[in-house]
Amino acid sequence: MIKEGNEETGEKEHVFSGFLRLLGFGPRKLGAVVLNAVIFIAQLISTSLNKPSPPYLIHERKINENNMFEWISNKSGISDLLTYAKSENLVDGIIKHIRENSLDEDSGCLQLLFCKSSPFVEGMQKALNNVHTQKGVKAFFEFLPNRTEIVRNGQWCEKKFPYCTVHF
């Protein structure tokens, strides 16, 4: 259960299940969302597998096994990915991508799921940008949103994405 404030870590042991209950995802609704996610991921995988790798990419993927850290840090794609991950409109971009690349109109629940998870994404972005002040296990929970933020965001998302038609 997620509680407001800076309580001990032990009181937040069921963060994920509490998060899903706060978002209003019962077993049926969650099943439909998972099914939408699996279909979407399968579409992405099939699209990427059907494209052959260009020869210049095959050469770029060769790793210098002696110094993997340098290879990773020197890749422009990694810095671009981090920049995109820190972007304020990351969730909106993902929702737009889902809307544009979905084969059917049944991706409403997936869009709602990403919208409702935005407080957690923002917390992860804060973790990327900030120095951790907590030590040990408490550092894991340092940037988690509180219950009020989750509920407020969930209500806003329900109004923005009313076309998730799965009811429990």
Image (spheres, rainbow, N blue to C red):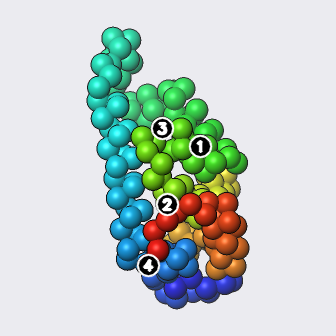
Q: Secondary structure at mark 4?
A: loop
Q: Which residue is mark 4?
A: 168
Q: Measure how far apart labels 4 and 2 are at the Cα level.
A: 13 Å
Q: Give the residue number, with chain letter if any, for mark 3.
A: 101
**Pointer 1 with pointer 4, Cβ within 8 A:** no
Q: Secondary structure at mark 1?
A: helix
Dot 3 or dot 4: first in sequence order is 3
**Lateral position of residue 88 relative to residue 137, left or right:** right
- Pick whichever of labels 2 and 3 is earlier in the sequence: 3
Residue 6 in view, yes or no: no
* Cα distance in 3D space between marks 2 and 1: 14 Å
The earlier-in-sequence mark between 4 and 2 is 2
Instruction: Count residues near mark 4 (Cα–Cα under 10 Å), then give few for <14, some for 14-19, many for 20+.
Output: few
Q: Which mark is first along the chain, 4 or 1?
A: 1
First in sequence: mark 2 or mark 1?
1
Q: Is residue 13 above or below residue 149?
A: below
Residue type at the position of mark 4:
Phe
Residue on which the image places disc 2: 109
Q: Secondary structure at mark 2?
A: helix
How far, Cα to Cα, is label 2 from label 3? Answer: 15 Å
Residue at screen point 38% across, 74% down: 28
The crowd level at tag 3 (other Cα within 10 Å; few <14, some 14-19, many 20+) is few
- Looking at the picture, which amino acid does disc 1 mark? Lys
> Looking at the image, do the residues carrying marks 2 and 1 touch, with CB atoms under 8 Å apart?
no
Residue ID for mark 1: 96
Q: Amino acid at mark 2?
A: Cys
Residue 19 position (above or below residue 106): below
Marks 3 and 1, the one that precedes in the sequence: 1
